[in-house]
Image: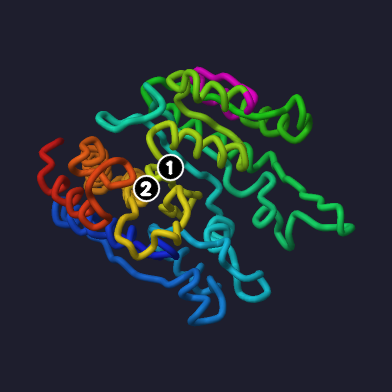
Amino acid sequence: MALDILVVQGDGIGPEITQATLTVVAALQKKFSLDLRLEYLDCGLVSLRKRGVTVRDEDIERAKRADGVVLGPMSVREYPPVEKGGINVPATFRTRLDLYANIRPSYVRPGLKATAQKMDLVMVRENLEDFYVDRNMFQGLGEFMPTEEVVIAMGKITATGSRRIARAACEIAIRRPRKKLTIVHKNPVLKMYHTLFLNEALKVVKEFPQLEVEDLMVDAVTALLIRTPERFDTILTTNMFGDILSDEAAELAGSLGLAASLNRGDRSAVANAGHGSAPDIAGKGIANPASLMLSTAMLFEHLGATRKDQRMLDAAAAFTRAVDGRLGSPETRTRDLGGRLGTMAFAEAVAKAVLDDRSK
């Protein structure tokens, strides 16, 4: 049965890196006989110009019907106020599709210079709650201004949300060789708020006795990621902490441009580059598409696992191998990483690596 993949190119460098990613997807389809139906949707600034709004209800319904979504980066900071059509596209996809888990792997690649000597971890970030005030309320925003000199922002953590992200993290950790889980919080300060998150996570952990479990405060983790990143395997944390820590880990692994990201819920999954839309280099053909490529590989792996489709699993593994292999050599990496290639030349090199791959 064909899998329907909805492609949203995004803003800034989004169309370029999406085109590059789809070049490799075409090679994967040929190599592994994948039955994929690609559909395209305009959101963001293009939609704002065409329709007066960055994303519509019918766009979200199309995303819900799709088996997976490839979402390019969005220039959210350039959007007008919500009342003028500037709706935050990534946040809307996450809330309306109930994408409660943000999965962000970071690892050191052979041949690519990185700050970390050794690191291979996965960040599992709760995606819908905490202090992200544009998405943590059923209606309205979680911040207000009672006087012109006072702003109040409200965070939200629920037992249900904490349990389900903890379960997602445990299911990832149990499949990794080290089977280690680190829960990150700040409960000595946010005594009820983070204690609820921690306690609910620890309840879920009891169902996974094979795991080695620790809990650490976020300030310690920010330092330990720099000093001894190899100590971490799977990290479970809240929305804001996960946002910051995952970017830190990506940079330690070589570049934020390598930050793969999968947003998933129980029914939907969205591959989304872990970086912004970089409008300053849009149209120059120099953007590094590795993040969106690796995110799409994660989407393929997720679809293969949930649908028990070995071809998709094999394609995902080949996709990741090809990207990492090309990043390992200055001859075949992009210029931002000290290489020689532009966006599409890198895509063509990765596509060739896919077709030449003899791994099993």
Q: Can I make out residue 218 in this image? A: yes
Identify the residue shown where x is 58% and y is 40%: 164
The amino acid beneath tag 1 is: Leu
Residue, disc 2: 291
Q: In the displayed structure, does residue 157 sit left or right of residue 282?
A: right
Q: Residue at x 50, y 17 (%)?
A: 212
Dot 2 surroundings within 10 Å: few (below 14), some, or many (20 or more)? many
Circles 2 and 1: CB distance less than 8 Å?
A: yes
Q: Quadrant of residue 111?
A: top left
Taking depth in this image into account, of 270 and 22 the one nearest to the observer is 22
Residue at the spot 54% in from the left edge and 72% down from the top edge = 54
Observer-nearest of 40 and 52: 52
Element type where label 1 sits in the image: helix
Q: Could you tell me which secondary element the residue under label 2 belongs to?
A: helix
Q: Could you say where residue 87 lies in the image, as x and y percent from the top left?
A: 60, 67
- Tag 1 or tag 2, which sits nearer the N-term? 1
Q: Name the residue under label 1.
A: 256
Q: Nearer the viewer, mark 2 or mark 1?
A: 1
User: Can you say which quadrant of the picture contains the N terminus?
Assistant: bottom left
